Image (spheres, helix red, strand yellow):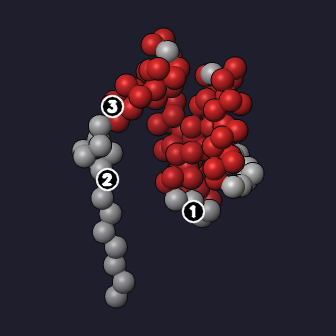
Amino acid sequence: MPGAIGFDIYGTLVDPLEMNEHLRPLVGDDLTDRFSELWRDKQIEYTFRRALMRRYENFGVCTRQALVYTASVLVPQAFSAWISPMKSRRGSSRSTRI
């Protein structure tokens, strides 16, 4: 019989607040907390929506799409400068919409 084991490391082994230190130089002190909060909310939302629709994507895809959404909403002036290199590294122009 096939089985699976799942681990939730977020908040247990990985400190999500540490990301704020990496975001601060990019988005500024005034947006850091809001940016990380919205990014995390969208990660979870996209993951759950896909599960409900039975359209699985790995968490890395959901994380990237949540980042794209968050950047486009909170820092639109910098969004295109950040996103262009990400798209070229991915080698795909796949839509980021859910």
Instruction: State whether residue 63 appears in this view.
Output: yes
Q: Amino acid at mark 1?
A: Tyr
Q: Residue at x 49, y 44 (%)?
A: 44
Please tell me whether residue 11 is drawn above or below residue 53 in the rendered image: above
- Residue labelled with disc 1: 56
Q: What mark, if any, has residue 6 been given in the picture?
A: none
Nearest the viewer among 14 and 84 is 84
**Percent coordinates x, y for residue 42 in the rendering:** 54, 39
The quadrant holding residue 54 is bottom right
Q: Are marks 3 and 2 in contact (CB under 8 Å)?
A: no
Residue found at the very far bottom of the displayed protein: 1
Amino acid residing under circle 2: Asp
Q: Of the residues under marks 3 and 2, which one precedes in the sequence? A: 2
Q: Residue at x 41, y 28 (%)?
A: 22
Mark 3 or mark 2: which is in front? Answer: 3
Say the numbered circle drawn on residue 8: 2
What kind of element bears circle 1? loop
Tell me which amino acid carries mark 3.
Answer: Glu
Q: Residue at x 47, y 37 (%)?
A: 40
Q: Say which label, 3 or 1, has the lower sequence index.
A: 3
The residue tagged 3 is 18
